[in-house]
Amino acid sequence: MIGQILGNRYELIEKIGGGGMAHVYKAKCRLLNRFVAIKILKSDFIDDEEFLKRFRVEAQAAASLSHPNIVSIYDVGQESDIHYIVMEYVNGMTLKNYLDEKGVLDWEEAVDITIKIALAIEHAHKNHIIHRDIKPHNILFTKDGMVKVTDFGIARAVSSSTITMAGNTIGSVHYFSPEQARGGFTDERSDLYSVGIVLFELLTGKLPFEGESPVAVALKHLQEQPPKVVEFNPNVPNGVNSIVMRAIQKEQSIRYQSASELLNDLGGILKEPNTQFVKPKITEDSPTVRMPSIGKSQLGNFKNADEGISKKTGDKNVSKKKEKTTTVLAVATSLLIIGIIIVFIVKGLSPIVHSLFGKSEDFIVQDYTNQNYFEVKGKLSEYEILVEEVRKNDDSIPKDVIIEQDRAEGERIKPGGYARIKFIVSDGPMLLKMKDYRRQEYRKVVTELEQLGLRPSVVDEHNEGVAKGYVIKTEPDINEETKPDSIVKVYRSLGPEIFTKKVPNLLGKNKSEALALLTGANLSIGNIYPKDTTYVMDKIIKQDPKAGTEVEEGTPVNIFLEDYNPDQRDVDTLITLDNPSEYGDDINVLVNATRSDTNRMETVYSATRKKSEFPIVIPITIPNGGSAQVHVYLDNSLYKEYTENF
């Protein structure tokens, strides 16, 4: 299919990948002059309505998503029996390739990548779309380090029909969830399980479940507990291990319930790597069990040995026992209520009681400046002294350190519920959190950063996915903090990088040979002259642009075929500029010729050409055995005249 043009717009250049349903090609969009990726459904499935339906669902689902961490969908179409989707072309590698190169990632890098994956999944889930096939093979890296999730080929809008299709468990067996393994109900938590498996692999270079067959792996997802990350990589902090283990819990109710919840823990773990995030499974010490009913034969074993005791006496004993139990319960309940009332009364009167009967010694205030506010607050709470805090930014004093206090050192105060000290506490240097400026017009971003007291510095880069003049990224990145008056790099897109190719020599070739040469050079055939090719030979005698000229990829090359007419032929006449300085940048060129067989003057060429294009070649038609008188005018003045002979 290389060289084929779809939708009169997308020229297939090379095959770059494929999956179970489709082949993926790199293509050139002639309209927007940019590279794209085109996914074409395999011919095996074009007669299968279920697959065609799923293929259309992919386009509709993915096209509704717009997020920097998701591969964009540009177009969808059908040409004859070819069903295709046009997507953003990501010039990079898959996460699987990257992992194969590095083996095991540093835990901070692994968490950073997982955050970007989770951001994409969060956006999809908010739009009611479940990916259902998260794996390193479906995660791409751009040249500038952007992580993008792709292949929503089996994504489904969340609805009442999110049950895995009967007989067709979808997803890659090493990464899918237990509910996918058993063909059950899948929801957002199924994606989060797969994200947890991916993070496990990034941290260890291994998968938690391996087997000799897909069925064996699926059974392990259902039945076996996964190993801990720290068993393979002891350098991973306990908190990171804890996040992975929670994400890959077999029970959906114990896993993360949303991508936002997972993102919150991933962000926190970068600050406190040893925080535990595993949600404990709640169990009962004495679980309810179903007891077998007691039959008559069993009841006989418990009959009183003394058959002489009458039924009446037995009934009296039971009645007295019930009365005694009721009395005990009533007394216990009364004592419990009285105790609760006393607790509330004591708690409400504690300040008064303390002032009357509490400690009589005064508390002596110390100098608490330059100490940690929370440590001081804890110490003062032991003496029932309340504290107030007022936060203040300070570039020189670390965050949470006390700057000032409203009580002097050595001052005496009475301990108790009404004693208090006010502190002014450093909130650290004033920091500005970076917003997401990606895909915004760069001048608007520069103005906003300047208004915030920052110093934007524009850096130009080519980018396939971001339109010219729009922001690719910033440094510092999204949600990172920076001080006022700091330099912020704004990466401005120059659009797709334009590649040039040399035009091959087509002279003497036929049309088929010319097409092969042009396709190999990422060029195409343009117009074919003469328009009426009935009386011409399939042999190229002229081309435009000329061989060796540097042109942009995709440029069409016009070709001129040899004429059959034995009574005349075309002769190329060369026009040079003897005194270029006498002319401006644009020159009006007029060429008239009088053929000997007609003795009638004809205009054979009239156009405006750039001075840089000279010398130029003009074909003149001459009769067999005859001649043509040629007059060349430049800027309406006769430049030269001469005679061309056959």
Image (spheres, rainbow, N blue to C red):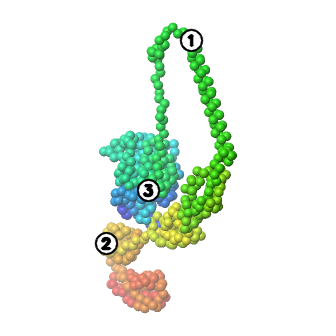
The residue under label 2 is which amino acid type?
Lys
Q: Nearer the viewer, mark 2 or mark 1?
A: 1
The residue under label 1 is which amino acid type?
Thr
Residue at point 46%, 17% (across, down): 295
Question: Which image quadrant for residue 400?
Answer: bottom right
Placement of the C terminus among the 4 image quadrants: bottom left
Please say whether residue 60 is visible from this viewpoint.
Answer: no
Which is more N-terminal, label 3 or label 1? Answer: 3
Residue at point 48%, 39% (across, down): 282
On the image, numbered disc 1 is attached to which residue? 313
Please say whether residue 618 is visible from this viewpoint.
Answer: yes
Q: CA distance from mark 3 to mark 2?
A: 58 Å
Considering the numbered disc 2 on the image, is that residue within a helix, a strand or a loop?
A: loop
Q: CA distance from mark 1 to mark 3?
A: 76 Å
102 vs 617, nearest the viewer: 102
Picture coordinates of residue 172, whole percent (x, y):
38, 48
Determine which of the numbered discs, if any, sits on residue 408 in the image. Answer: none
Residue 73 placement, left or right of 173: right
Determine which of the numbered discs, if any, sits on residue 509 in the image. Answer: 2
Q: Nearer the viewer, mark 3 or mark 2?
A: 3
On the image, numbered disc 3 is attached to which residue? 111
Picture coordinates of residue 171, whole percent (x, y):
40, 47
Which is more N-terminal, label 2 or label 3? Answer: 3
Residue farthest along the top direction in this orientation:
308
Residue at point 47%, 49% (across, down): 277
Picture coordinates of residue 388, whole percent (x, y):
63, 56
Q: Compared with residue 287, is residue 543 higher up or lower down, i.e. above or below?
A: below
341 vs 212, nearest the viewer: 341
Question: Which image quadrant for residue 29?
Answer: bottom left
Q: Compared with residue 185, is residue 13 higher up or lower down, i.e. above or below?
A: below
